[in-house]
Amino acid sequence: MLRHINSEGIIGLSCCFVAAGVPSVMVSLWSIPDGVFWKNI
């Protein structure tokens, strides 16, 4: 089930990681082809 994710949700998620003590967070709003990744785990 895919749904649209807006930038506010991504920013909020990043802030949660930083608040939890994660030193750096990298996020992207770009769609990536991850089918091969999921097949190989």
Image (spheres, rainbow, N blue to C red):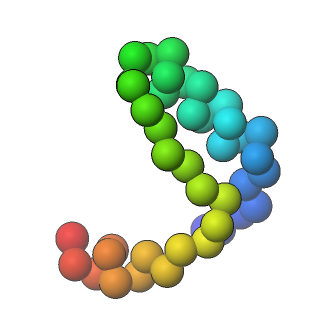
Q: 18 left or right of 22?
A: right
12 to the left or right of 14:
right
Extreme-front residue of the structure: 24
Labels in figure, total: 0
From the viewer's perspective, is residue 5 above or below residue 32? above
User: Does residue 14 sit above or below 31 in this rendering?
Assistant: above
- Determine the residue located farthest toward the left in the rendered image: 41
Q: Is residue 33 left or right of residue 6?
A: left
Q: Give coordinates of residue 5: x percent, y percent.
A: 73, 54
In the image, taking residue 35 as reference, residue 30 lies left or right, namely right
- Image spot of residue 17 (x, y percent): 48, 27
Q: Quadrant of the N terminus?
A: bottom right
The quadrant of the picture occupied by the C terminus is: bottom left
Residue at 61% x, 71% y is 31
Q: Residue 24 at x, y = what percent?
A: 43, 32
Percent position of residue 32, x then y: 53, 74
Residue at 66% of width from left, 59% of height from top? 29
Q: Nearer the viewer, residue 35 or 11?
A: 11
Q: Residue at x 22, y 78 (%)?
A: 40
Q: Residue at x 50, y 22 (%)?
A: 18
- Compared with 37, 13 (above or below) is above
